[in-house]
Amino acid sequence: MLNRSCIPTTFHLKGLSGLENIYGWVSVPLCFMFFVSIMGNGVILYVIHRDHKLHQPMFLLLTTLAITDILFSLSTSPSVLSIFLFHHHNIRSQLCLLQMCFIQLLSISESSLLAAMAYDRYVAICHPLRYTAILTNSAVAKAILVSGLRGTLFLPAIISLQFLPYCKGNVLSHSYCLHQDVMKLACDGSNTFNIVYGFATILGTTSVDIVFIVITYILIIKVVSHVASKMEQYKLFNTCVSHLCAVFMFYIPMMALSVVHRFHVKAPSGFTNFISNSYIFVPPMINPIIYSIKNRQIRESFRETFHLRKIIW
């Protein structure tokens, strides 16, 4: 029978079991994605800060998204890279809890921002004449504040983890600390609060955001479909492509991880590890790229800021 104990002093993070000899090769694309995430989002912030024409509600949301992505990368990627670069698998429990706080806070905040950006696209396409009246800088600032406050709703569940008895060791399933992963190590019957409160919080935040985004795009498609010109339809919907890419890159890995943990789906460890690492590396890397390529104002400002010749995309 396993002994009941307080939270372990350290947790053991999992890499790619049995493939330790290729860790060096695995670290190359991970380091590249981490570098692109920091540099790409940093450039987005610099360009928007320098160009006063971009000091608009839509780009205020994009600025906050870039800051969120940078913080997300800085709070998660180092523990993954330390495994593949230095074979360092252990993390102190307090650092593990802190990392979970950042992951949940920033994940819920980013979900809220994506919902706000969907609304921005809806107003721009469906009510263009009222855009400046509806989406003022003040309204967007309030939406950003609400997104941050929503992120804090999950913190009680994480804080409670340090008071649970643990009977199932200290080995985690991923290369970083995830709430559902740590929660499963607690003794059976001791984590009811985490299960119920965590599920309710996710249901009331990211799930609501997903439904809101879907409804928003249904309304957008309905309006665009009534536009007579096919070229005009293409131009209108093309303004949504970058946001849609960001939505898919963010929610697909998140939902896959949630399904694996909450419904106890048995999946190959390699696949689970791939999904979990995709969740923390891909969205922060992809977001600045797609917004740089698909947003004309960002492209023009980027070219003017760095004195580049015009490129036709």
Image (tube, rainbow, N blue to C red):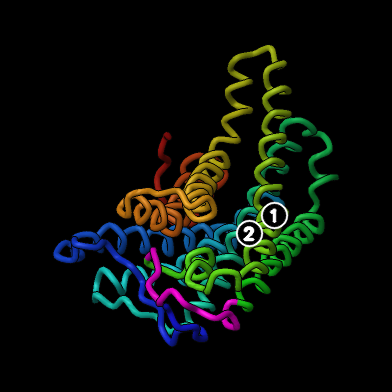
For the C terminus, the quadrant is: top left
* Element at label 1: loop
**Is residue 144 highlighted in magenta?**
no
For label 2, the crowd category at 10 Å Cα-Cα, with few meaning under 14, some 14 to 19 and many 20 or more, is many
Residue 124 % position (x, y)? 73, 37
Magenta span contains residue 171:
yes
Where is residue 171? Give x, y as percent: 37, 72
Left or right of residue 295: residue 120: right
At 80% from the left edge and 44% from the top edge, which residue is drawn?
A: 132
Query: Which residue bears the numbered disc 2?
Result: 108
Residue type at the position of mark 2: Ile
The amino acid on which the numbered mark 1 sits, given as a three-letter code, is Thr
- Quarter that holds the N terminus: bottom left
For marks 1 and 2 on the same chain, the one whose residue lies earlier in the sequence? 2
Numbered range of the magenta stretch: 161-174
Residue at 35 percent across and 58 percent down: it is: 33
Q: Nearer the viewer, residue 313 or 6?
A: 6
| Frontmost residue, 135 versus 250 | 250
Disc marking residue 205: 1
Q: Examine the rendered structure and indicate whether residue 38 appears above or below residue 1.
A: above
- In three-dimensional space, the C-alpha distance between marks 1 and 2, rounded to whole angstroms, equals 7 Å
Residue 75, horizontal then vertical, whole percent: 48, 72
Residue at the front extreme?
A: 1
**Image position, residue 241 (x, y; %):** 55, 35
The answer to whether 121 appears left or right of 299 in the picture is: right
Q: Is residue 123 visible?
A: yes
State how many labels appear. 2
Which image quadrant for residue 242?
top right
Whether residue 303 is visible: no
